Image (tube, rainbow, N blue to C red):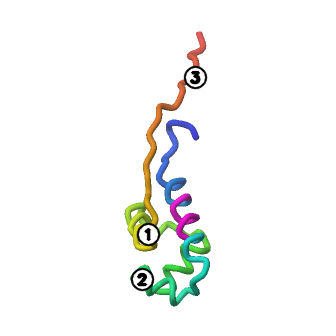
Amino acid sequence: MRPSQDPIPELKAQAARALCDALKPWNRDGAAALLGTDRFRIADIRSGRLERFSLVMLVRYLARVHMRVELSISRVPRPYARE
């Protein structure tokens, strides 16, 4: 990832993948009840339509299925400047 790119879409995608894995045993109605949302939102997550979800909401959903989210921060190496 380039430093100028927005990291939020990739973080949302990672959260959604983890959530989908946790919800595999559940159908849409069961997963919706577990997360406190509706079946259409579950369908959106499972199909990767994440525009309507904030990263905060996805993290809260992960917590509801007993998953811990950790954020790792590191410096991106800067390319050498050309002279």
Please, what is the three-letter code of the amino acid marked with disc 1?
Answer: His
The residue depicted at 50 percent of the width and 59 percent of the height is 12
Q: Nearer the viewer, residue 63 or 28?
A: 63
The residue depicted at 55 percent of the width and 60 percent of the height is 13
- Residue 68, compared with residue 76, is above or below; it is below
Q: Secondary structure at mark 1?
A: loop
Q: Which residue is mark 1?
A: 66
Residue 24: quadrant of the picture = bottom right
Q: Which residue is mark 3?
A: 79
Percent position of residue 79, x then y = 58, 23
Q: Alpha carbon of mark 1 to alpha carbon of mark 3: how far?
A: 40 Å
Q: Which residue is mark 2?
A: 37
The residue depicted at 51 percent of the width and 36 percent of the height is 3
Please, what is the three-letter code of the amino acid marked with disc 2?
Answer: Thr
Please, what is the three-letter code of the amino acid marked with disc 3?
Answer: Pro
Q: Secondary structure at mark 3?
A: loop
User: Are the two marked residues, 2 and 3, in contact with CB atoms closer than 8 angstroms?
Assistant: no
Q: Nearer the viewer, residue 7 or 30?
A: 30
Q: Nearer the viewer, residue 75 or 81?
A: 75
Percent position of residue 55, x then y = 42, 61
Residues shaded magenta:
14-19
Percent position of residue 19, x then y = 53, 69
